[in-house]
Image: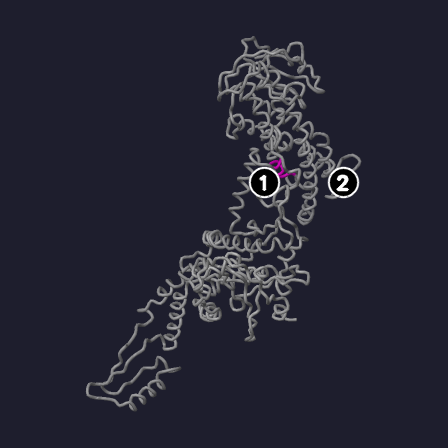
Amino acid sequence: MNLIAQFKSWSERNVQKAGQVFSFIQKFLTVSWMDTDFRTLIDKGYKASSAVSNCVRALAFSFPEPQLIAYKETKEGEQPVGANDPLQKLIRHPNPDMGEAEFMQFLVTYCSCGGNVYIWKERSKNGKVLYLWPFSDKDVKPVPGENPLEGFVAGYEFYCGDGGEPIYLSKNDVIHWKWMVDPEQPWKGIGAIEFAARDIQNDTESSRYTYAMFKNNAVPPIAVTTPEGDELDDATVKRLQKQWLKRYGGDNQGVPAFLQGGMTIQKLGMNMQELNLSELKNVPESRICGAFGVPPSIALLYVGLKRSDYGDGMARKSYTETTLVALWRNCASELTSSLSDEFGGGYVLQYALNQVKALAENVNELWTRLLSALDKAAITRAEFKRAVGLKVLPSDNVYRTSMINGWEPAGEAPSNPNVAIEGGSGKSNANMKGIPEKTGTRAAPEKHWLATKSNGPDESKSANAVYGRALQRIRATMWPNMSKDLDGYFATLSDRVVSRAGKALQGMSERKEGLPQIDDLLTQKDAEDLNKMLKKWFVAIAQASWETINMSMGVDIAFDMTDPAITKMLATAGGDVKDIVETTRNALQEALKYGNENGWSIQQLVKGDENQAGIQAIVDETYKGRSTTIARTEMGNAQNAVSSERYKSNGVKLVGILDNGDSDDDDECKVANGQVWTIDYFESNRLEHPNCTRCSYPIFDDVTPDQS
């Protein structure tokens, strides 16, 4: 059964009449006298004008770029339905003859040329939509509605092309997408070709005239005149015309002409240079492009190319934003309106604009803005994913509370560990009697006293000691995650070292050299990667500790990456990286020395022997269990660097010391615990040893320091 037969089989010939209601369309408008024949638009426009065909080509090639995605509303918001959803399957495979991209080409071609595209919904016996078929104004005509119950369109007539009566189609079986609304006939659209009809005629006429001129050797029409008194009868004129064309027309164009005595040649028109046809064509070409919404450079027309550098990124972006995005929005809206209820309702169809290359810059800007909002807890992770088109999970309804792995459920008051007091109640100290409230930026802190649980016999009774213990808890919460990051780094470092040794094998054998040098195994990029990781965690501990430090001094200063406390702290990362990497270099250097002395091959260098471990084992064993030590030490050093710099910038001269925590039973730490130091002495002795838990809090009392 062909497509026409399918129409005849499924058409509804009997239309039920609506009740008598007022007409909102004037009777004289229900019959259109302004119909423009679709075949004429195609023959005289699309096929006759290269400007028109180039514009349609640009639309047909660019419109299918993004896929059409089906979303459905859930309790987590709009979610992609997935490839197995029946509506999504229909979009990917609209009918047996077309894929999604070709289907979209049909839509935009029919719509831009004729002003309308009609998508017939082929149904199964039980009424389920099976396929979508696109048709043009050549095949389908809308029937104007006569009252609000019918709407602007009462139905559609399908013409089979056999001269018979048209088949009536219910408007529930047709998706009608218009290029532009025709104000005089609102039940149908008007296309770009009709908008630019006169300019298209001008363009084709100038092309025809240029072609005729070239056939005539680029010479304008001429007149041969005879001397006065030498009159010619009709027979003589015809004879001379025939002789002229025979001698100087066709392949003889350009041959010198020899005239009878007294005859002269007079030019009747302008030549190519005088006409300046290239400029004459610019005006209609520009207007044609305007009707289609396609820049001349995108349509590859001369008026655009002469100003183009073939890198028209701005033109492509403008074309995408002003023309294509609007078309995608309109098309998706019509498809959603007609197809959603066919599959149970609740669907929203949207084109995946993140797949459009011309909008990549916009997408990057969107990600930047959303990531910033996510980091500042302005939006939930679910809102972030939804905005960038990612699948949202029930667990995503959380806010970020720190830069690294800190999340709080949405709708709950955040339990910020930064301001928790001893005992882990999670309540803000600012609400407790005797604890200073936040005040203005760099406000002078007041002195407050509160009896607290003592960490040692000499610990000050200052209420601010609670903030020192809060800083220690923040550090203890974060270092395990940093340790995991370091474990991953050292594992990949081991693999990279072995891989580099293998790659060096061929080159070294050709040069007849020994084992590779240490710089062949450990590169600058290894140090840069480690430096980047340390800085990430340094910033994380600084941000997590910032509010606690604020409250300990009674100030309210926003976290800022350009703050001197942050910049000075980050400057120390380079030295830390050097110390960590130096351990690996020394161990590998010993293996290389041993291998060279014993004539090892690359394979032996990797595996080692009973006396010397191989390079993979060296890296693994060197850092086995050290990730925890490095994480605790580096995070403590970074936190103390930030706190001391912030104390100094706010006029704090003395700090109380908290030490001798966890398994830290070093004698120096036992002595330091509970002492009062000058801020300068603390800066020089931020940690006593690896894994040290030393921390400080500001002292505002006039006391004699134990260390200065």
Secondary structure of residue under mark 2: helix
Report the predominant secondary structure element of the magenta stretch.
helix
Disc 2 designates what residue?
607
Closer to the observer: label 2 or label 1? 1
Q: Quick one: 203 or 634, which is closer to the camera?
A: 203
**Mark seen at residue 384:** 1
Q: How is the image coloured?
A: one colour
Answer few, some or many: residues within 10 Å of disc 2's Cα (few below 14, many 20 plus, some between 14 and 19).
some
Q: Quadrant of the N terminus?
A: bottom right
Q: Residue 637 location in percent, x, y?
A: 61, 24
Residue 539 drawn above or below residue 462: below
**Mark seen at residue 425:** none
User: Which residue is farthest left?
Assistant: 229
Residue plotted at (68% across, 46% down):
503
Closer to the N terminus: mark 2 or mark 1? 1
Answer few, some or many: residues within 10 Å of disc 1's Cα (few below 14, many 20 plus, some between 14 and 19).
some
Residue 526 belongs to magenta span: yes
Residue 291 drawn above or below residue 579: below
User: Which image quarter: residue 268?
Assistant: bottom left
Q: Quadrant of the C terminus?
A: top right
Residue 103 makes an appearance in the image? yes
The amino acid at mark 1 is Phe
Residue 300 makes an appearance in the image? no
Secondary structure of residue under mark 1: helix
The amino acid at mark 2 is Lys
Residue 630 belongs to magenta span: no
Q: Residue 603 location in percent, x, y?
A: 74, 44
Q: Which residues are magenta?
A: 522-530
Q: Quick one: 32 or 294, which is closer to the camera?
A: 32
Tally the marks: 2
Residue 202 drawn above or below residue 674: below
